[in-house]
Each structure stands twice: as C-alpha cells, then as structure tokens.
Image: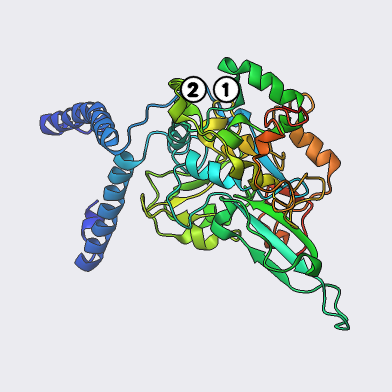
Amino acid sequence: MRRLIQMPPQVLRIFLLAVGIVVAYSIARYFLTPPSFGEFGWYRGAALAELATRDRVYAGKLACEECHSDEYQKLVKHEHKSLACESCHGPGEAHSKDPRKDNIEKSSFATCLRCHEANPSRPKWHKQIVTKNHYPGSKCTECHVPHSPSEVP
Amino acid sequence: MNKAVSRRSLLGKVGAAVAGLLAAPAAKAAKAVVQKVLVSADAPKDYDPTRHKWVMAIDANRCIGCGFCAEACKKENHVPEGPYFRTWVERYIITKPKPDSGAARGETLVDCPNGGMHGYPEAPVPKEEIQHSFFVPKLCNLCHHSPCVQVCPVGATFDAPDGAVLIDPKYCIGCGFCIQACPYGCRFLSPVTRTAEKCTLCYHRITRGLKPACVEVCPAQARIFGDLKHPLPEDPIQQFYQKNLVVALKPHLGTEPRVFYAGIDKEVR
C-alpha cells in the first residue's frame, strides 16, 4: 500500500482518474441498464411486449363473420373467397367495436376497377375489363354481385 | 504472529460491513426508482417470442397491383402521410428490344406512384412495346444477418427471436445509420416521431394470432405469411416453398433474407 502511494504523483493521478472513470461507469451502468436488457439479446426485451400492445385498426375476417355470417358464407363460396372483408370495406376495428353505418366504408365503382381495370402488368389469370368497352356508363353492380360474382342479380 | 487488533480498526471494519449491507438494498431501491422514470412497461405475458418464427413470402405471379396492402399498412401502422412506406408495390416493365439492336430485351422501367397505395395507372408505354411486366410487393426482407442491426449504435434495432426485425422506439435516437445500411430501402425516418421506422410484420397483430394487415387484405394471396415453428395443416407458407422456385433479393450481399420471392425477374433488386 505504502509502495503504491509512493509512486510518482503524476502516475498516481492518472491511476486515480482511471479508477474514478471505471467506478462512475459502473454506477451509471448499474442504474441505467433497463431491467429487461439482455433477456433475448443485446437489446431491451420489454420492447417486444411494448410493440405488441399497440391497438389494431384492421379487425380481421373472423371479427366480421361474428355479425355478418350470411355475407361471409356467400363470400367464401365464390370467386372472391380470397378477399378479406376489409380489402374493399376498409379498416373495421372501430366498426366491430361500435357497429354503425358511418364508420365503415361502402365500396364503390373505383374499388372494383382497382383490381379489374385492364393493365398489361397484371397477371394473365386475373379477370380484367377495359371500362370504355365493357358496358360504358353502367355500374358494376347492375350485372355483378360483389360477394358472389358468379351469381346474376 | 500475534497481531493485536486495535479497537479503532475493528470498529472501522464492522462499520464498513454494516454500511455495505445497508447500501445494497438502498442501491436496489434507487435503481428501481431511476428505471421507473426511464421505462414503464405494462405488457401482456401470454406470448412467448422464442416459440415462433414468423416469415413472409411473396408470390409475384399472384400480385395484381391493387395496392391494398400498401394502403392497409399505412392505416394499420399510422405511417406518416407522404413518401413513407413500410411496404409498397413496384411495377416493372421490360420493353421489347429495338429491331436489329441485337439485344435480348429492351429497357427496364420501374415505377411506384405513391407506393402503389392508390392502385396503378396505365402503363407509361403502349402495350405492344412491352415484353414483360409485373408487380413486386416489397417489405422488410427479415435478414438473417441484418446490416441495420449491426450498425445501430444504441441497440435500438434488433432481430427478435420470433423472426421480426424490430425497432425499440424508446431507445432509437434517430441517427439514421440503419436507414443507410438497409440495402432494400425498407426503413425511413419518421417526421412525426423522429425515430427510424420499418415493417414490424404487424407485431401487434401477429402476437394476437392475426395476420399482418397487408396479408389480411391481399385479394390475390400474393403475400403468404406463416410460422415456421408451428406449421399449420396445409400450411400456405410450406406449400409456397414446395410449389415455387424461390429467390432472395440481393443475395450477393450476404444478408440472407428470410423473405423469399417467386416469379420475379433478374431486374428486381
């Protein structure tokens, strides 16, 4: 001990400074490391659960089925079975919690054409029309039922 | 040697030991207070991230370019207005070569108006001049060796055990290193939160047993989502791997993406 203290003062000062830095770092690290850090890796494990607690905007097909099972059954039996309700009707979480007519979209002419207007980039298996040649001036729903496209109204 | 222990030194040692014993719980209590100020997590406990491995696959043969996915992503995740997308749809048009040019193919035109989220307008070149054209949905490629994770200086972005590459919004300092590092352009700096943002595979949905919003609304099953650790009977993701020859984007970078694409051209990066 006495030996250590007898080291040249300039060396002693650097030594004490180094010890001080290490101690300060250790204290800061002890207090500031989040509790879940290192749970899964080099990050805050609690972030996973925090990201999972966000509220959803799209309810999912099954939430729609609870009330609209008749339309749902029609949908899954026809060509549009791969569509979700919310593909055309927009996000439905608000509507599923508080079912009103004004918090869900009513799909329109434009919704149909977003998929079915002819475009050379769309794959060939997909049914497409050129609007100006395909009964111009009439609505899609005059001849097609969106929930069961192969039926005739 | 019989060394006499002085009263002073003994009292000093006992005092230090008592102080040490008292200091440990005091430090723990102080630590709890500090951490409560720094982080507050009230999180559900019924989801175990180590028991899942989520993955998405893209079948470009099925994509019809409606852009419902990009729109749903924007709404579901409250992505800021403007040119910010967590997922988007690109249109590739490869024109026919000029006659007598000796080339196999013409130009490659790529466009993505508004992320494709309002659908696609007519092609910029006449139909007769197009050799091939197709849509490619893009999202985080869920790299096995993620460059974005490697460059994050604060450990705010990470490869979660369940396969999602996530950002801890409380620890992100918005330095933008990850945005530069991502070779797929899948990240952006949010003008609202001033932190980096990216596709989370709709982490708040998949942890509750729902599909990501883009997969939910895709009318053509171009996006396939599944859990590699819990394959379903007739699992769509396993069927996708069985039916298709798949490619990853930019394989030469060694990022080893987990998102595989089927039906895309060599021009897709």
> At 47% across and 38% down in the image, what residue appears?
A38
The quadrant in which residue B268 appears is bottom right
Residue hosting label 2: A96
Which amino acid type is marked by label 1? Cys
Image vertical order of residue B141 relative to residue B163, above or below: below
Along the polypeptide, which appears first: circle 2 or circle 1? 1
Nearer-the-camera pick, A91 or A115 = A115
Q: Amino acid at mark 2?
A: Ser
Q: Is residue B161 visible?
A: no
Using the image, determine if residue A72 lies above or below residue B79: above
Q: Nearer the viewer, residue B7 or B191?
A: B191
| Residues packed near mark 2 inside 10 Å, few (<14), some (14 to 19) or many (20 plus) | some
- Where residue B121 appears, x then y in whole percent? 63, 58
Q: Residue at x 76, y 67 (%)?
A: B94
Residue holding disc 1: A64
Q: Chain of mark 2?
A: A
Residue B105 x %, y %: 82, 72
